Image (spheres, grey):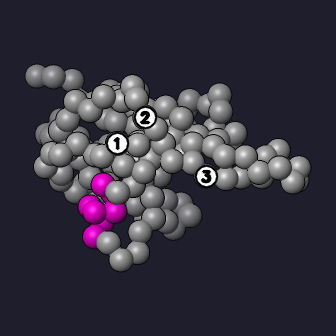
Amino acid sequence: MPRLEVFLGHMGGPFWRGRDAAAWSIPKGTYTDEEPLAAALREFSEEVGRPAPDVEYRELGAFRYASGKRVWVFAGESDFDASDIRSNVFELEWPPRSGRRQSFPELDAAGWFALDDARERLVKGQRPALDALERLVGG
């Protein structure tokens, strides 16, 4: 049986530069008038720079961060090439109080990680999604 891996993106910008532990994320974003899966596919495309794989997706659930924000997470089986991402950008005053605005990619890297490695890299609020994935695949 092949080893289960998850696709994660390293958060871009100066706050995450040089960090690895708890600095990776499942591609995600906000939505209002969309269904959660439609929003997830749109956000994937924006953050990764290519459409999400055309596969069957299963909802892993909604997970609440300590801040109260909720994220819906979906899983699908794919061998998506993580080596070529072209993330959208956000603007930030950097350095702080400098008056200079700079653009940074939302994701500056992406990759596939085994579950144990993903747990260490993933931001804390998204780690329960890995448990849900393990339950889904029976592992």
Farthest-out residue, left: 1
Which residue is label 1 attached to? 50
Specify whether residue 24 is in view.
Answer: no
Question: Which residue is drawn at the image coordinates 49% and 31% (left, top)?
Answer: 109
**Quick one: label 2 or label 1, which is nearer the N terminus?**
1
Going from N to C along the chain, the mark reached first, 3 or 1, is 1
Query: Would residue 122 be found to the left or right of residue 128 on screen?
Result: right
Q: State how many labels appear.
A: 3
CB atoms of marks 3 and 1 within 8 Å:
no
Q: Main secondary structure of the magenta part?
A: helix
Q: CA distance from mark 3 to mark 2?
A: 16 Å
Which residue carries the number 2 mark? 85
Residue shown at 73%/46% (left/top)? 102
**Residue 90: mark:** 3
Residue beneath the point at 40% across and 29% down: 84
Is residue 39 shown in magenta?
A: yes
The image position of residue 43, as x and y in percent, is 39, 55
Name the amino acid type tagged 2: Ile
Quadrant where the N terminus is found in the figure? top left
Instruction: Bin the neighbour count of mark 1 within 10 Å (Cα to Cα): few under 14, some 14-19, many 20 and up.
Output: some
Q: Secondary structure at mark 1?
A: loop
Corner quadrant of residue 55: top left
User: Which contiguous range is marked in magenta?
Assistant: 35-41
Q: Position of residue 4 (x, y in %)?
A: 23, 29
Query: Where is residue 2, by image quadrant?
Result: top left
| Residue furthest out toward the bottom | 33
